[in-house]
Image (cartoon, helix red, strand yellow):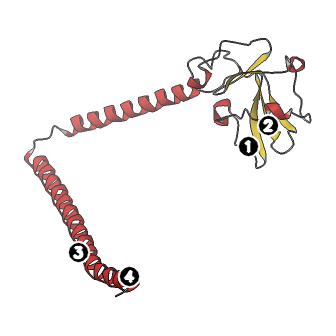
């Protein structure tokens, strides 16, 4: 026999033995999965049965204790939610709080303004041309191409909506600009962020 014929015979032999073994393994997995689900349902039913038995036998405290516990649980839940909302509010930009950025990981290397440099959160300090130091950006102007790559990673932190298609928020000094990606046209300016 030539090599091609031998390879075909070996492939046929392997396929006739491998496929049934694969099917058997899948059937075994299905049976085990069904058995696990059946056991879980039995355990759940048993726990519910025991709870009902405890309730009938009076092993639970009075209804007032039960209500008091539920009330405490609700109070704890609402207190946690209130704390979460406070933390969320403190984590966002606030025009009235000049130190809102302190403790944020994306401002880790920020030490205040530096002459000849701008700072972009998560990017760090980068050098700028002297003519752009203290520059006041205006709607309708253009941002130079070398400063368009410092995108705002999370606009929600600054209270901004998602940028429209074809636009991005960019850090430019202490300002955030909404620019057209293709041309650098400035659509809006949020000045004095940090």
Residue indicated by mark 1: 163
Is residue 62 or residue 33 the one in the foreground? 33
Q: Nearer the viewer, residue 50 or 155?
A: 155
Instruction: Please report the residue visible at 34 percent of the width from the left and 83 percent of the height from the top.
Output: 6
The mark nearer the N terminus, 4 or 2, is 4
Query: Would you say the residues marked 2 and 1 are in contact, meaning their CB atoms lie under 8 Å apart?
Result: yes
Query: Which of the pair 30/48 is nearer the observer?
Result: 30
Snapshot quadrant of residue 75: top left
**From mark 3 to mark 1, how far is it between C-alphas?**
54 Å
Q: Is residue 77 above or below residue 131?
A: below
> Which mark is first along the chain, 1 or 3?
3
Circles 4 and 1, Cβ within 8 Å, touching? The answer is no
Give the image location of residue 117, x and y in percent: 77, 17
User: Which quadrant would residue 60 be assigned to in this image?
Assistant: top left
In the picture, the disc for residue 178 is 2
Sequence order check, earlier mark of 2 and 3: 3
User: Which secondary structure lies at badge 1?
Assistant: loop
- The quarter in which the C terminus is drawn is top right
Q: Nearer the viewer, mark 4 or mark 2?
A: 4
Q: Sequence order check: which comes first, mark 3 or mark 4?
A: 4
For residue 57, side relative to residue 92 (left or right): left
Residue assigned mark 4? 3
């Amino acid at each position: 026999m030539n090599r091609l014929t031998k390879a075909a015979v070996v492939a046929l032999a392997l396929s006739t033995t491998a496929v049934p073994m694969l099917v058997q393994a899948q059937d075994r997995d299905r049976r085990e999965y069904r058995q696990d689900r059946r056991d879980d349902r039995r355990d759940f039913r048993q726990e519910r049965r025991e709870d009902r038995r405890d309730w009938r036998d009076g092993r639970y405290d009075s209804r007032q204790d039960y209500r008091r516990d539920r009330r405490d649980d609700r109070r704890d839940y609402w207190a946690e939610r209130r704390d979460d909302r406070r933390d969320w509010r403190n984590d966002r930009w606030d025009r009235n709080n000049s130190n809102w950025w302190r403790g944020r990981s994306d401002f880790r290397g920020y030490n205040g303004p530096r002459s000849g440099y701008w700072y972009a959160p998560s990017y760090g300090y980068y050098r700028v041309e002297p003519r752009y130091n203290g520059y006041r950006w205006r709607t309708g102007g253009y941002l130079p191409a070398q400063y368009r790559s410092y995108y705002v990673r999370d606009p929600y932190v600054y209270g901004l909506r998602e940028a429209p298609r074809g636009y991005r928020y960019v850090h430019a000094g202490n300002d955030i600009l909404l620019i057209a990606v293709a041309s650098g046209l400035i659509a809006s300016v949020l000045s004095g962020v940090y």
